[in-house]
Image (spheres, grey):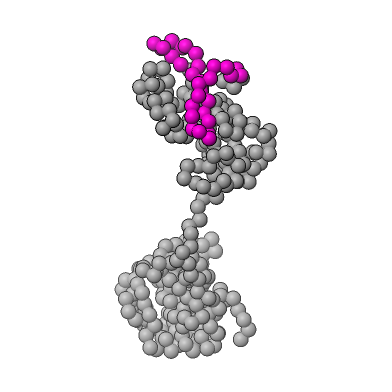
Amino acid sequence: MKTVNRETWLQLGVQELSREVFEPVGLKVPKVNVSVSIMSSGTRKQKNLRIGENWHTSCSTAGNHEIFMNPFFFDRKKSSRTLDVLAHELIHAIDDNKNGHGKVFRDMAIKIGLTGKMRATEAGPELKSKCDKIVKKIGEFPHDMMTTPTNAKKQGTRNIKVECNCCGFSFRTSQKNIDLMLDSVFVDEDIDCLACADGSLQVVKTPPFPPMGDGHNHLKLFIMTIYEIKKRTKNTAPYFFSAKTLKFFGQKISDFKVKKLNETEYLIHAPSYCNEKLMGKSMHIFNTITNDLNSCSFIDADLVK
């Protein structure tokens, strides 16, 4: 017999099972499509492994029963087993998926030679003999079992979070889109926030400081926020962002805006009040190398708009 693919083999299996197993006991197999596919649940773990599924005709635009066989269970050595599981799913199709594994299913299963618990049947001696003969006729199931390496790492998200350093607006995008953003601005120029227009999305290809705890200098987006600065100045300026200090100057942490000056310095500024009267702006420069906050009096007016 010439080489066939998996789906063709399964359809040949349906034809042979219908002729050799179902028709002799008065059962007619309806039109079905059979494929190898990941299960809707219980795919890879051996405990509670689901090895076959039958989807009702209402789920098919063609009005057919759709049967799926689990690629993590079957292989060439289990060709006969593949056929008896296929027979199990064909009973569901004959029953039109109406009665689960109850009495109607059980009566048909016993009639064709399936044994064991109805949710996990196996071929009895007579049915196994028929399945073995069918395998000799149509050949082995042309599939090599899939497996999941035990040490395989879960794939993390490919998208990177982008956040405004002022209003908190955020979104996720790909590294490709970040590179396009970088190409659209001058070196070290900030990208204005799309939501508030006051803040900015600060992007650098090689950050002068990697995220805390990460010794790698990845090609990635890094956005310096006031919350990051607060965390980094916990030891160098422990009282600057304290609740008492902020209350004294009538400020909230979200009032501060962050502006990149160069590769190692960021300007932070916020309105400063005394008895609810605006006194001016509080302006400091954060150094990313030392994590120091230094006050400043003279700064380009355009930077604090």
Q: Which of the two residues, 192 or 151, is positioned nearer the viewer here?
A: 151
Residue 300 visible (yes or no): yes
Magenta region: 272-301
Residue 43 pos. (x, y %): 43, 66
Q: In which quarter of the image is the C terminus?
A: top right
Residue 13 pos. (x, y %): 51, 80
Magenta stretch encompasses residue 287: yes
Q: Which of the two residues, 105 or 191, is positioned nearer the viewer here?
A: 191
154 to 131, vertically: above or below: above
Please report the residue visible at 35 percent of the width from the left and 22 percent of the height from the top: 244
Q: How many marks?
A: 0
Residue 57 visible (yes or no): no
Please report the residue visible at 47 percent of the width from the left and 87 percent of the height from the top: 132
Magenta stretch encompasses residue 55: no
Q: In which quarter of the image is the N terminus?
A: bottom right
Residue 110: quadrant of the picture:
bottom left
Q: Which of the two residues, 257 or 113, is positioned nearer the viewer here?
A: 257
169 to 304, vertically: above or below: below
Please report the residue visible at 53 percent of the width from the left and 42 percent of the height from the top: 210
182 to 16, vertically: above or below: above
161 to 1, vertically: above or below: above
Residue 61 pos. (x, y %): 53, 61
Residue 81 pos. (x, y %): 44, 80
